Image (spheres, rainbow, N blue to C red):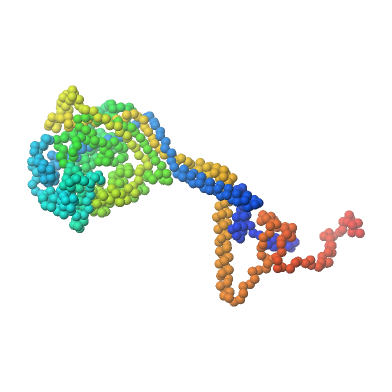
Amino acid sequence: AATAPGKKITARLKRTLPVRGPQAPTLSELMRWYCLNTNTHGCRRIVVSRGRLRRLLWILLTLSAVGLILWQCAELLMNYYSASVSVTVQFQKLPFPAVTICNINPYKYSAMKEYLSELDKETKKALETFYGFSEGKSKVRRSVDDWNSTGSDFFQQIPLLKVEDFYRTATDLHSGQKRKIEGSVFHKDSSIVNSGDSNDIIGFQLCDANNSSECALYTFSSGVNAIQEWYKLHYMNIMAQIPLETKEKLSYSADDLLLTCFFDGLSCDKRHFTRFHHPLHGNCYTFNSGENGTILSTSTGGSEYGLQVVLYIDEADYNPFLVTSTGAKIIVHDQNEYPFIEDIGTEIETAAATSIGMHFTRSRKLSKPYSDCTETGADIPVENLYNKSYSLQICLHSCFQKAMVDSCGCAQYAQPLPAGAEYCNYKKNPNWMYCYYRLHEKFVKEQLGCQQICKDACSFKEWALTTSIAQWPSTVSEDWMLRVLSWDKGQKLNKKLNKTDLANLMVFYKDLNERFISENPANTLVILLSNFGGQLGLWMSCSVVCVIEIVEVFFIDSLSIVLRRQWQRAKKWWHGRQRGGAGPAPPAGDPERQGHHNPACLDEDLPTFTTALRLPLPQDSPLPRTPPPNYSTLRLETAFSEQLPDTLELGQ
């Protein structure tokens, strides 16, 4: 019972003293409390400074410091997501790459004649009609007199055209009839439009089989390019209908292509090569493919310790309309990479020795958020049709093939088949040519979305090639060398070798320096936090505790004040609605129970009787009067049963 009055006084003081800090009723009072109690000196100086000018200066200085902190922190964040490039060079024994070799001519022309006789006849007729070309005795050792005289429907549907009258009419080179050109005109040779006589331009027109009014004319400023493009278009249609096993027999075998082989100073043969059939290049052969689980390596640089092969090209059996150059194509690649010979292959000349020196480089890029690359391609929504490790080219070709199957109903011949699809041909897909060209046009213009979906690989290997060419064989050694090679292979080939049928190839490491290029984060998380702390301490003399304080006051406490005021307003509105105008609202409350500002007390001071006496009284309350004394309370009552002897004198 003795502590009851103290509790009442404490409760009275809490109701009367002003509310500060997180429980402040307004945001202005909260900000004032924060400035007086924070550890950042600038905010405190704004409140305690005397004079408007000095206070204004401190406001400008504080705001400038905050702006500098935000700017510097933004720079630190941007620098955090940057990467530095480091190059490491090591001298060590290097694995030898895979080397894929293809004859430029994919199939032996003598074996393909029965399949291409109608196409060759139409091509020959177009040359005679347009250029007045009459094939006499061929320079190459073959016979082309047995052309098949029967025509074909798809040659008549897509003939070569001679453009006339400024792209308004064209002459059909197959029938000689004129036709009106309708639809769009596309120039396939660069972006140059022939400014001369339009009669010098030839091309072909493709129309939608389902809508004959939808047509597109493809023109070429060079007749050679026009005839080759038209020939390849029909050639792919024919080859798509031939089974793979038959095509492998029509192409070159390892015994046909390889004459001699040396690696690292030791002899090698066809057992070290793996056959790989390419749709456009026929049978290709990969040295050191790693299919048997063994990858060859070399510990010495130089041409004597690399791969040396002599290739038999057999120029006499080349298709005259499909290819216009002679030689072989090679590509150096990793064992897990697909050899895109048609894109990045290097051509090898005949009657020459081609030396290719290599520098090996491994590169490693950082993935997100530093760069937009992919580790394995698993995050790319495109099916890998090549069964090799991911690369940007694989993704682009697979994406186009998938779009081809979805849009045209069949697959393009030069790329692998998706599951359940088949290659396009006229018999089953009469509209595939028009669809293919339209789709390829969108692909080149980046309208299919493949370039946006596909990403670079984060890790890749690269062999930088340096090519040099020398005449081979030399004049003085030509005779005996050709005799020896003819003795080795001549009986099987049943003909004397010619130097224009041979190509000498050397692939080797110029040095054994492995270059490793890697990206590393320019800043770690520890460095970033340290830089943040340095900026806060430099401009605001602030620490991590100060940052937590700012978050608490400016976000948590400010939000609670706003929500509390909104709740009070809603509560007041609800009470007013419940009263429904029954009478005037009751008084706001006893003035003595309402809090008011007291400059004499601080929120952190404990309530005492002295501070209670300093409380100002409400204006409309009467002055307190001293109550009359209760004399019975003045009576002294001892707490002891007997009075102590030393107090008797005082009592008397």
Residue occupying image coordinates x 70% and y 57%: 600
298 left or right, relative to 617: left
Residue, far top: 476
Residue occupying image coordinates x 63% and y 50%: 54
Residue occupying image coordinates x 40% and y 34%: 87
Residue occupying image coordinates x 19% and y 41%: 248
10 left or right, relative to 105: right
Q: Position of residue 432 (x, y in %)?
A: 21, 52
The image quadrant where one finds the N terminus is bottom right
606 left or right, relative to 198: right
> Residue 268, can we see it?
no
Residue 448 lies, with reference to residue 528, above or below; the image says: below
* Near-viewer residue (398 or 59): 59
Q: Position of residue 369 (x, y in %)?
A: 42, 46
Q: Give the tally of numbered discs.
A: 0
Residue, far front: 196
Residue 628 lies, with reference to residue 234, above or below; the image says: below
> Residue 407, can we see it?
yes
Q: Position of residue 652 (x, y in %)?
A: 91, 59
